[in-house]
Amino acid sequence: MAAAGSSPSIVEYFGGEDGYRCGYCKNETGNLSHGMWAHSMTVQDYQDLIDRGWRRSGKCVYKPIMNQTCCPQYTIRCQALRFQPSKSHKKVLKKMLKFISKGDVSKAASEDEPMDSHIEDAVACDFAYKGESHISQSELTPLSEDHTERVESEEKNTGETKEEVNVQKVESGCPQICTDKDTPVPGEPSRSTKIVHAPPKPGKGADLSKPPCRKAKDIRKERKLQKLLQNQMCTLGGSQLQTDDQVFLLQNSKSKTNQPKTIEDFVFVSLPDDAQHKLEVRLVPVSFEDPQFKSSFNQSAALFAKYQMAIHKDTPSDCGENEAENAPNGPECGYGSFHQQYWLDGKIIAVGVIDILPYCVSSVYLYYDPDYSFLSLGVYSALREIAFTRQLHEKAPDLCFYYMGFYIHSCPKMRYKGQYRPSDLLCPETYVWTPIERCLPLLEHSKYCRFNQDMKAVDEGRIKDLGRVRVLHKRTIMPYSVYKKGRKGPSDEASVQQYASLVGQTCSERMLLFRS
């Protein structure tokens, strides 16, 4: 992400009418996405883009055409502050603890899917990489302030109003990281809509619309206490215990040792002095100016190549970012792109690529040493990233979500992300967040769904004034209304309209759309 005080986001829009091969259903032309090439991108712009269904893979930023693509991909976020690990999550955490402390190795195949996004990033963005930008850096560098003021002055002489012809100065084009924006509240379907929870189909795993199963011993303890209460009521000769007292007894029947364990209880537990292994997680900014990133780059790159060739059958030639951004009231590490390196006994065994944004930690990619696949590193790293989100929240109160990329209901193998609860899916039409429990019954009936059941609701961030879209043309920043008047050749208004409708009014007025 662009460093604070630098130039604003600069993007090229590619459209997305051509279909490409889908990595989920293997349809050769069914994968349809809109795409942009981000020459630079601020963290606030990317935060706003992912809240409109966009996602990045390197410098490629893409948005599935939800009502046309073969496998609709819904943005999913986990409410990290309320997250409780499931039974299968705890198994992964315990397995790692046993391995570190005792050296126990369980080679049994894990039932959990790896919590990474390599499939999405590898296939959903093919079209953008084929159209990778070849624009020189000089064309992307805005001219001096004197030149922009001269263009502004010339336009004023045409008699137009100042608002219509204002050509932005370079300094005013640098968006600031916003930290006072209200946290989005999950949207709720209309109460008049009756939702029927469909039973899970064979072979498709647990019914995510129902709460997790309780432990049998907890149920037995509760039943035993209820019987005890009934016996007490009988022996008291009619003087029954008050309801409040019964509730109090029920609530206090569970000892503290039986309270659900959090991720932190597993991750930050004290290890014995004679632990067999040492695991260290380091957060490293993606920047060659950072000494840790620079010193570990070769080892990290070698691990990436090993992972890609072993897991995805890439050739060595296929395996052939961005910097951190600081802001007041933000996390100490700053915002931007980072690597979470997992060091085991002095060796990197996994790298989680994450974006730290104003309101979330966004998981981008994970690669790991296939020799350690028995540790379920995909799931383990996701749980560590949720715990990390909670840590960042203590310093940056607005940062409280963990974005997991896309949830693909039409692909059973990709439904595992719904097991990280509580979580929400993004409505593809109104861009409001909806609890996943409300979405699943709808997705059972149709792979493409509008989750917001208020049919009168519209996209509040929709484009309202195309003329205010910011454009970078011939190294000059100007509103589209000015660019349009001086443009020669066929009109590009339809393309700009599509771009603006997808990124929304706010981003279209902050980011610079490159026009040749």
Image: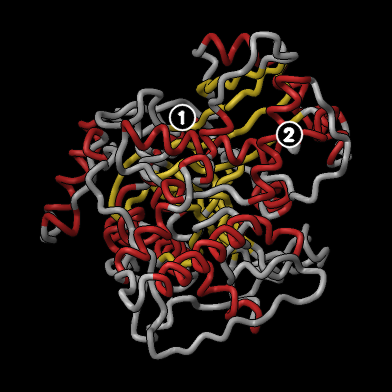
Expressed as whole percent of the image width and height from the top left, the position of residue 423 reads: 50, 58
Please name the residue shown 30% across and 74% down the image. Answer: 239
Q: Reply above or below: 461 against 38.
A: below
Please name the residue shown 22% across and 45% down the image. Answer: 180
Expressed as whole percent of the image width and height from the top left, the position of residue 256 reads: 46, 41
Residue 492 seen from this side:
no
Quadrant where the N terminus lies?
top left
**Camera-nearest residue between 450 and 192:** 192
Residue 460 seen from this side:
yes
Count the labels in the image: 2
Residue type at mark 2 is: Lys
Estimate how packed mark 1 is, as few (under 14), some (14 to 19) or many (20 or more) residues with alpha carbons within 10 Å: few
Q: Which colour scheme is used?
A: secondary structure
Please name the residue shown 48% across and 62% down the image. Answer: 424
Residue type at mark 1 is: Ser
Estimate how packed mark 2 is, as few (under 14), some (14 to 19) or many (20 or more) residues with alpha carbons within 10 Å: some
Expressed as whole percent of the image width and height from the top left, the position of residue 82 reads: 43, 51
Q: Residue 95: which disc?
A: 2
User: For numbered disc 2, what is the local secondary structure?
Assistant: helix
Q: Residue 378: which disc?
A: none
User: For numbered disc 1, what is the local secondary structure?
Assistant: helix
Horizontal arrangement in the rendering, residue 315 relative to residue 359 (left or right): right
Give the labeled residue for mark 1: 138
Q: Reply above or below: 487 against 110.
A: below
Please name the residue shown 70% across and 66% down the image. Answer: 206
